[in-house]
Image (cartoon, rainbow, N blue to C red):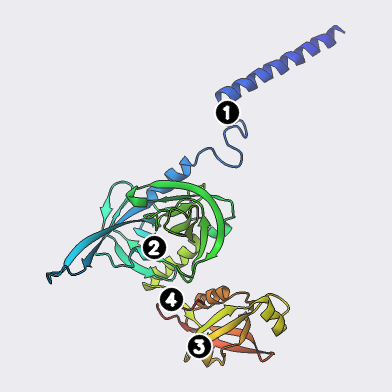
Amino acid sequence: MANFKSAFVFILQSIVVGLAVAFLVVLVRPDLMPGIAEEPGGPASYADAVSLSAPSVANIYTKRLVQESDDGTNRPRFRVDTAFASAVIIDKDGYLVTNFHVFQDEPTEIRVQFSDGRIAEPEIVGLDAETDLALLKVNLPGLQPIRFAESDKLRIGDVVLAIGNPYGLSTSVTQGIVSATGRNLYQLVTFANFIQTDAAINAGNSGGALINTLGELVGINAAVLAQDTGTEGIGFAIPVDLVRGVVEQIKLNGRVIRGYLGLLPDDLTDAERFALGIENSTGIMLMEVYEGGPAAAAGLREGDIILEINGEPVYSQRQALLISASTAPGDEVDILAIRDDLRFTTTVTAGERPQGLVDTPD
């Protein structure tokens, strides 16, 4: 019995000592306890992600000489317009990515200021209006490139941060979530499936970085829905997966070379599919087949219904345009289509997409 009492007292003392030690650990070093140092669902701070990526975000300052209206003296009057934007360092060779629309009005002076205070006049390597991207280059040592993530792995609800130069306030950071992916904004660009976010993107954020909580680049900030006080929490960024391909082409060719099939597609309604006897959600209608273009040469006509391109079922005009643009000039593209209730196949030899082409339905 005495042995039992001794063992019981020993166990009780051990429990008390263990609880006391655990209490002291939680009090002194809460970071060692799982779930104590972090808020539910994420870290208490994104400072590490910002310090990792912010040195890779630069400020752009532009000036443009604008002629004002004649004041009656027959002497032209000019003013200087200034603007702010942002850019992201993507490699140690001095390449930076920003937005095409920053240079759309042909500024007479462009300067880039880096996080360490250095200022340089960049070379414009290439512009791509159809994705609203521009590639710049500076000759400076010691630049810190940003790390790339994979934007196709983004999920709605993921936390993101926007870093840029809004209104000239350099290295400003806003935080939000991914509100949607794959947004199509024809009024802005042809080929960017935008990331929608409620992280604040203001004037001057254009060309800045949208990062994840690891400090990796997921997108290039591009636009807000409207420049008025009644619209909040709706901003857009160009996915980094698209940025990679555009940058590679500009480096190689000085511009982006895309395939061209010479057709203007439109979506089908469910009622139109039913009338055509299409049992699933595939199919697009050719609103126009451009005269002298590759599709016309292959025998396609206005009103034809395309079901597949290169064996891939086609569900929307947007998808058809992206497939078309992803081809290279000279590629052979197999088409499965319907005309007068009969299915047929043809092969289109892709051409090169003309610069400045507008081929999205109104």
CB within 8 Å, label 3 to label 2? no
Q: Nearer the viewer, residue 214 or 238?
A: 238
Q: CA distance from mark 4 to mark 1?
A: 55 Å
Earlier sequence position, callout 4 versus callout 1 = 1
Question: What kind of residue is marked 4?
Answer: Ile
| Of 71 and 315, the residue lying toward us | 71
Q: For the residues carrying marks 4 and 3, which lies nearer the camera in this image? A: 3
- Quickly name the residue at label 2: 99
Q: CA distance from mark 4 to mark 2?
A: 18 Å
Q: Secondary structure at mark 1?
A: helix
Which tag, 1 or 2, sits closer to the chain's start? 1
The image quadrant of residue 337 is bottom right
Amino acid type assigned to the residue bearing label 1 in the image: Pro
What amino acid type should be assigned to the residue bearing mark 2? Asn
- Within 10 Å of the Cα at label 4, are there few (<14), some (14-19), or many (20+) other Cα atoms? many
Q: Amino acid at mark 3?
A: Pro
Identify the element where label 3 is drawn: helix
Residue 294: assigned label: 3
Task: State whether residue 201 is above or below residue 314.
Answer: above
Which one is in front in this view, the residue at disc 3 or the one at disc 2? 2
**In terms of sequence position, does the residue under pointer 4 or pointer 3 come before the other?**
4
Q: Is residue 19 visible?
A: yes
